[in-house]
Image: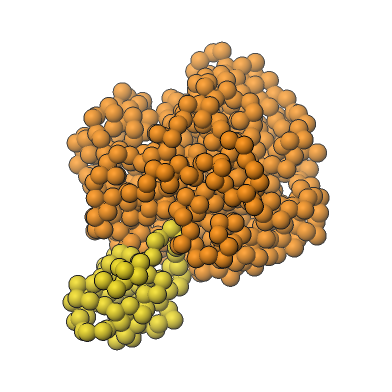
Amino acid sequence: MAKLLRVNMTDLSVRFEDVPEKYALLGGRGLTSSIIYDEVPPLCHPLGPDNKLVIAPGIVSGTKAPTSGRTSFGGKSPLTGGIKESNAGGLSSQKIARLGIKAIIVEGQPKEKGRFYVLRVDKDGARLLPADHLKGKGMYEVCDLLWKEHGEGVAIIGIGPAGEMLMSAAGICVNDQENTAGRYAGRGGLGAVMGSKGLKAIVIDDRGGPGVEIKNPELFEQGIKKLTQASLTHDVTKKGGALNTYGTNVLVNIMNEAGGYPTRNFSSGRFELASQISGETKAEIIHKRNGEGMTGHPCHPGCIIQCSDRWANPDGTFKVSVMEYESVWALGANCGIGDLDKIADLIWLCNDIGVDTIEMGDTIAVAMEAGLLPFGDADGAIRLLNEEVRHGTPLGRILGNGCVFTGRAFGVTRVPAVKGQGMPAYEPRAVKGIGVTYATSTMGADHTAGYTIAPEILGVGGKADPFAVQKADLSRAFQATTAFIDSTGYCLFDAFCVLDIPEGFEGMVESCAGVLGVNWTTQDAIRLGYEIIRKERLFNEAAGFTRAHDRLPDFMTKEPLPPHNTVFDVPPEELDAVYDFSKWPKEVVGEVAG
Amino acid sequence: MIEIHLYGDLRRYIGQEDPRQDAVAFLNARLGLTVAEALQELGVPLDEARHIFINGLYDPEGLERKLQDGDRVGVFPRNMTMPHIRLFAPRTKHESQA
Ligand code: SF4
């Protein structure tokens, strides 16, 4: 039977507990958000002793299900003040699951400030070890040292100096098979929550672990067969498809052509240097340099989509992983920087210091808007990260707390954020559907809720043309589906193939049902998604959020964005409809009490 | 003048394979010229043209559209198929006739 591992940082004790019945069918985000909802007081300080950091592999993580090694991290966010789930690939999910652990709950706070610990988890249990020697160190060195101490191949979850300094832009890093510090649960400042617990890193050694119990192997096998088939045939996810060939950075030219590629702190939807930093150019340079770089890299064993990459320096030596769409945009176009090698330097620094690339890109662009440095000044941006943020200078602490904090410090009004969280790389004035999701998501401005499956499965209007569906209904359905997928352990990029191939989604659901020993229909899965976002919404309401927080920044409703010269004009009533429980689809969720 | 921007593997049809350079073909506007006809003129096989944007607006029926002087067309191949297609509002009837 799988267990919960509870780690108390106040008295430095660890304890394994049975999984309560109500959590038995949950995993990933469903589990982290439920535990936060049940155990964390919504009004607590995110960096105080009452907040908790919950870490959970997905339902099928640790099995042979393809592309299923995502780890969910949850807590109350110091950036948004609301509930947060942020997930990452890398080695941790499969190993936690194979040790028979359903979730790790880190709670309390050490009495002695400034002391840090490493949690080691293996088949014999868990213990806390002093980590004084890792204090202040960047994630690359932390990963090297921990592999030396604990053996090659162990999974590492850790924070850089930004997390230790409790910066709201701090993320949580997971190593990959090459032990590169490159996979991040970046959003929402959960690195600062981990830092506030005095936890520098977690080492997971799954050798000799019991593995994951599969209650209905037949159903499981049938499910992964269908999903694998969908994944291998869809143009986005197949070998040689969009993600495998160009990575997520395939989107640069597409969004730029659509006029929705935010440029220079969201002042234009087209970047004149887009072709210099596009997915096509990235792939071409990696192949030309013909050294340690590669495209089509899996961020964890068993990923069959392989959207990750390893970027090489001009001399062919390895530089950084991963040059993905959001990071390249945030530290590139959004800062007016059109040079992939400079962007690689900036991503490398974010990954070492332990800050979210999206939040830092938004922040540096706001600093540019404030006149601290000109747009396009890559060396200036490098200096800000390496000399200010890394060392926690007063300026570094302002920047390290994100774009809203920085905008306030320097009197900038064009700050692209919702609920305190900086926006990702889709301009809501050009792509209004995602604006609805940015505005209303329980997570703050978040792009990962932007994918969906066929509308007839979601129950948002029969076999209707998806474009004819109300934006509120579509966004709500997106958000619920994403919450379900985030609970499975499958990478959200699997959503692209189940989007067009209904058997793929059936397979995804059947593989989960096979592990859990239940009979789930696709409707049951979507219902679970709705239950998750409902709990998250209720947590946020109790934490003080109102409808006024479900709005895009003022400037986006006033300043027309070139080239389309449109403003964000989705009416407030439509935004409010997304979380109006009385408008939720009854055929999927039944009657929901408000 | 009409600008046609080609991406990914479609670049090669106009001899611009360096992805750092924009691959743009210019055609003279002609009454009733459709996107499909323009692509055929450039030698781009229609079954390789997966997603079409006209003046930055995604157009699911893009191949059939008639072009006008000053239009900008963006064409993406199959392996740059768009993960987020459902986020884009299509051109309305009104816009496409305008
Ligand atoms: S598709 Fe990409 S992000 Fe998802 S698991 Fe695979 S390599 Fe990681």
What residue appears at the point 75 percent right and 39 percent down from the top-left corner?
A24
* Relative depth, front residue between A446 and A345: A446
Looking at the image, the residue that sits furthest to the top is A111
Q: Is residue B34 left or right of residue A529?
A: left
What residue appears at the point 50 percent right and 26 percent down from the top-left corner?
A543
What residue appears at the point 61 percent right and 59 percent down from the top-left corner?
A457
Residue A370 visible at all: yes
Percent x, y of residue A435: 39, 48
* Relative depth, front residue between B76 and A303: B76
Residue B74 visible at all: no
Q: What shade does chain A have? A: orange
Q: Is residue B20 left or right of residue A54?
A: left
Percent x, y of residue A305: 56, 61
Which quadrant is home to the N terminus of chain A? top right
* Relative depth, front residue between A347 and A462: A462
* Colouring chosen for the image of the structure: by chain
Percent x, y of residue A176: 55, 47
Q: Quadrant of residue A22?
A: top right
Q: Count the marks.
A: 0
Which quadrant is home to the C terminus of chain A? top right
What residue appears at the point 29 percent right and 44 percent down from the top-left corner?
A557
Chain in yellow on the image: B
Percent x, y of residue A282: 38, 60
Identify whether B80 is placed above or below A316.
Answer: below
